[in-house]
Amino acid sequence: MRILHVLSQVEVTGAETYAATLIAQQALQGHEVLVVSDTLATPVAAAYVPMPIARRDYPHRIRNVIGLRRLIRRDRIDVVNAHSRAASWVAFFATRGTKVPLVSTIHSRQWAPLQSRWYSVYGERVVAVTECLLEHMRDDLGIPASRLRLIRNAVDLDRYRLGLEHADIRSQLGLNGEPVIALISRLSHGKAEVARFFVGQVLPRVRAVEPRATLIVVGGQRMPDGLSKFVSATETRLGVGSIRLVGHQPDVRGYLQAADVVVGSGSVAVEALAMRRPVVALGQGSYLGVVSECSVAEARTCLFGDHTETQPRDAEQVAKDVVALLRDRERRRKLGEWGRSFVEQAYSPARVQQRFDDVYRQARLRRLSGGRIPVLMYHRVVSEPVCGGRHGTWVTVERFAGHLRSLKRRGMTTITLRDCAAAARGEKGLPPRPVILTFDDGYLDNYTNAFPLLKKLGMTGVIFLVADPALASNAWDAPTGEPWAPLMTRDQVLEMAEYGIEFGSHSLTHPRLPDLPGEELRAELCESKGILESWLRRPVSSLAYPYGAVDERVKRAARQAGYEFGVATNSGPIRFDEDLLEIRRVHILPWTDAFQFWKRSSPWYFRYKTIKGNLPQHPVPQPAGSRHAAARLADADEVPAPHELAAMR
């Protein structure tokens, strides 16, 4: 995929560090990456094009839009990722009228003008790096919950580690065993006030009980007027050498390693934890205290104090926390060991990059399709009506042929989920009116009855197979009284695959996946995928949940097993692109006549059902025997569902 990152940077900020770490991972995965920004101090694994994105006067904005639009066309960009409001504004107008989607990553609280609720410049997807920002984008800027995603900062774990190459900062500064506090910040805007507070109010209290404590202040690429004089005056009052103002440093790792305690927030706090340094979280908005296993959940929701509304700070409490850490070497050691382990789990660049890949794919599919790709669900296609069936899982050959002719007359083109994956990766486009035909279970009549009709009309579809080679019929239906029906053979599957039919997994043995313990769930998903891939000699990337039963645990397991798409039945968002692991389908029933089929196969069908009020977004799970059972739980993988966002207030 060809990715363009757009930043408005006149000094090094957490947004630049975040983007650089993400870009490094994207380059490792083979993506082609380009960066546009005013300046770029952090080395990146991408081509850099300077452009004054931070200039907000309209002549510059218009020139930036034109320049960015030319760049997008010249380099055939697949997705644009903006990292500030100024960058989003330019990228929004540069991508209008194109097939290129915009994803905005939000690193700080945004200005919320009145017109922001009339139209949004943040694009098809909005990524917030903390829960506080996600809530802010929803409540203050009116971004719909369906477009919001939560993806935390990443930190370069190889770069931020203890090492001998960082060990000489203390000697360079003439320090000989003094307790060292490091305050690392860009020292502009609200960060300058935090620095003034700590230097002027906290440090004197610390020095009153720890007279040898020394503060290193790192930062200040754009030093505010008067701050350096204020620091010098405070040093004179506290004693020469009590404060070392070292200014902006392109590499802060040595200063992190030199510190006994790091005072900071944002990306600095994460980097300090990665380097096994205890952190006192003092941010632009609030003071959260010593970061530990007990307090980290709260700290990470607001990026260690940066993303909350401004709250009063107690200098006495901050000083007590710093002194307690300086006096307790063993506690510092334990916090350092825990901090490294925590960052490795929570801020892995590979995990963040994978999450962004998902967001990019969703954004591309939304831009290419408008989010409205009908996905129709069939099971059997029979010569004669089935007697005794309870679930309506068949249509006659005559009726199925009528459905296909209806799609053809209306100019609709059948595609597969594999086609969607290729379009999402930027490898191909989508036809103007796509539709996806899916068939569950892999019945023999899909080969004998449906396949000839699909070939005759030049159509395709997706068939989800129960992969256990020992299953030759629908044995799972016997307890519910469903009539016996044979399944396709391996040779028939290969013939259909050669024609262009996509095959996906319908699990190994057709159980209700949410009811399975972890190991059995993984086996059902992974073994079925492995068997089908060994037959087909190609990746299997799609999954249909048996009985339509799915919850967030099942989706996480499906993602870990390597599935890109998961199709449900009566659950999932109404737009195709909003959750690619819970795609809502339209069940085509034996009694679906021509008019009903026209409605059910139309891109607006789910919107119509929503307006009528008979399409709940999160239906109550049906009894275990129901074919349409579905369970929806809160997303514990940091991608809040719309109903979770509503509960965040």
Image: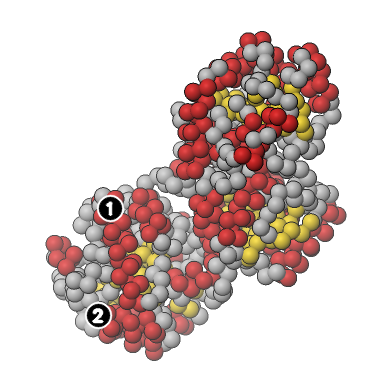
Q: Please report the residue visible at 54 percent of the width from the left and 66 percent of the height from the top.
A: 424
Q: Nearer the viewer, residue 246 or 25?
A: 246
Q: Secondary structure beneath disc 1?
A: helix
Q: CA distance from mark 2 to mark 1?
A: 28 Å
Residue 307 visible to the viewer: no
Residue 538 visible to the viewer: yes
Residue type indicated by callout 2: Thr
Q: Left or right: where does residue 586 sit relative to residue 527?
A: right
Q: Secondary structure beneath disc 2?
A: loop
Q: Please report the residue visible at 84 percent of the width from the left and 54 percent of the height from the top.
A: 60
The mark nearer the N terminus, 2 or 1, is 2
What residue sits right under mark 1 in the picture? 519
Q: Position of residue 285 (x, y in %)?
A: 64, 29
Q: Position of residue 32 (x, y in %)?
A: 63, 65
The quarter holding residue 363 reads bottom right
Q: Is residue 390 above or below residue 254?
A: below
Q: Left or right: where does residue 16 sit relative to residue 552?
A: right
Q: Left or right: where does residue 114 sit relative to residue 127?
A: right
Residue type indicated by callout 1: Glu
Q: Dot 2: few (<14), some (14–19), or many (≥20) neighbours within 10 Å? A: some
Q: Which residue, as the protein is rendered here, is positioned at the far top?
A: 208
What residue sits right under mark 2 in the picture? 489
Q: Dot 1: few (<14), some (14–19), or many (≥20) neighbours within 10 Å? A: few
Q: Please report the residue visible at 55 percent of the width from the left and 29 percent of the height from the top.
A: 278
Q: Position of residue 282 (x, y in %)?
A: 62, 27
Q: Please report the residue visible at 42 percent of the width from the left and 44 percent of the height from the top.
A: 636
Q: Nearer the viewer, residue 378 or 359?
A: 359
Q: How is the image coloured?
A: secondary structure
